[in-house]
Amino acid sequence: MRGLGEFALIDRINAGRVQTPGVLLGPGDDAALVAAPDGRFVVTTDMLVQDRHFRLDWSGPEDIGRKAIAQNAADVVAMGATPTAFVVALGCPADTPLELVDGLADGMWAEAARAGASIAGGDLVRSRDLVISVTAFGDLGGGAPITRSGARVGDIVAVAGRLGWSAAGLDAFTAGVSGTEVAEALAAHRVPQPPYAAVLDALRCGSTTAGSADVGPHALTDVSDGLLADLGHVAAASSVAIDLDSAALRDPALERVAAVLDADAAQWILTGGEDHAFAGSWAPGRPLPAGWVAIGHVVAGHGLTVDGVAQTGDGGWESFRGAAWATGDEPR
């Protein structure tokens, strides 16, 4: 980085990149220009800090780049919006190898493309540690945002995507366990795979279906901090209770990983985050869209239960409450 300099590096990162239609003006000016077709846009931002959210001895640069984009794209999609653009701020030491930055950029662009968007610009700064901050924008397409506050008593609670795999990978990394039996879990921790299409296809289908006023999810969230924690936010915002079915949450493949690590797969599923699956509530009496699996119900009351039993202890990750990564606490 020291040998190349900021502006040459910006040119290097952007060489050959093609912007999607949502970006009207990309890198090269004082600011980017992003379309807002219906006069609004969804915006979110998230940050990754070296040795807090990722480790370079566990994840490659492309993995880290994909993860940085994925966790922001998932938040946009969880609002019912289609990602349109990302801006990225990167802080790194002057002795950072150019190949590392190339890998980060390649991973970011690959995940942005998977989400249907592109990177409109950003900033570079010298810093002590590697820090990545991403801001994401999304288009609601004329629809209403899907918030956490829309769950209704009687709704079906369903999930799209896998739960617990990133937490399993973290435990495997922390324990120094590798090999084919845990390879899938390690990969899941390195790079989340949010099922964007499971949400966006369901919304598109609802918008073109006659009598579709109640086809889409009433409430929606991305599972970043743990299923109990994130659905707990939905229950609180909606002034309802949610009861989960433990049998519906079982994952035999994850249980095999848990046997290798002498761990509890159910605990990974309930409290592990960073898989960036989607959880939401849907009107009863209608088939769930493709990719969604029922895991519980919305009931009267408050709080969250599993098989009718209230859960105690932490339901997931919360920043500033955990200790440093080196102690084995969740690094989020």
Image: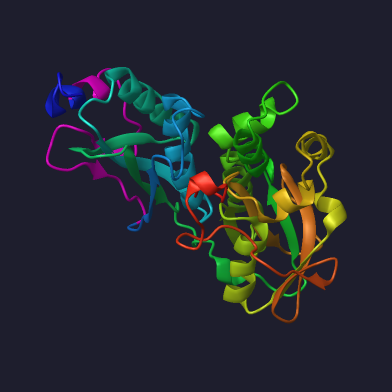
As drawn, 310 above or below 253: below
Q: Is 29 placed left or right of 225 in the picture?
A: left
- Quadrant containing the N terminus is top left
As drawn, 11 above or below 75: above
As drawn, 31 above or below 11: below
Measuring from the top left, give residue 80's x and y in whole percent: 52, 54
Measuring from the top left, give residue 239's x and y in whole percent: 63, 79
Measuring from the top left, give residue 15's x and y in whole percent: 25, 19
As drawn, 1 above or below 308: above
The quarter of the displayed image where residue 98 is located: top left
Q: Nearer the viewer, residue 182 or 80?
A: 182
Q: Nearer the viewer, residue 139 or 301?
A: 301
Residue at figure coordinates x 64%, y 72% from the top left: 235
Q: Is 289 placed left or right of 105 in the picture?
A: right
- The segment highlighted magenta reads 11-38
Q: Is residue 221 visible?
A: yes
Residue at figure coordinates x 28%, y 20% from the top left: 97
Residue at figure coordinates x 69%, y 73% from the top left: 152
Q: State whether the magenta stretch is mostly helix, strand or loop.
A: loop
The quarter of the displayed image where residue 184 is located: top right
* Residue at the outermost front position: 327
Measuring from the top left, give residue 230's x and y in whole percent: 60, 61
Q: Is 260 placed left or right of 139 in the picture?
A: right
The quarter of the displayed image where residue 117 is located: top left
- The verdict on residue 124 being magenta is no
Colouring scheme applied when the structure was drawn? rainbow
- The verdict on residue 13 being magenta is yes
Q: Nearer the viewer, residue 318 or 148?
A: 318
Q: Is residue 191 visible?
A: no
Q: Looking at the image, how many numbered discs can be counted on the residues?
A: 0
Q: Nearer the viewer, residue 67 or 72?
A: 67
Residue at figure coordinates x 84%, y 39% from the top left: 252
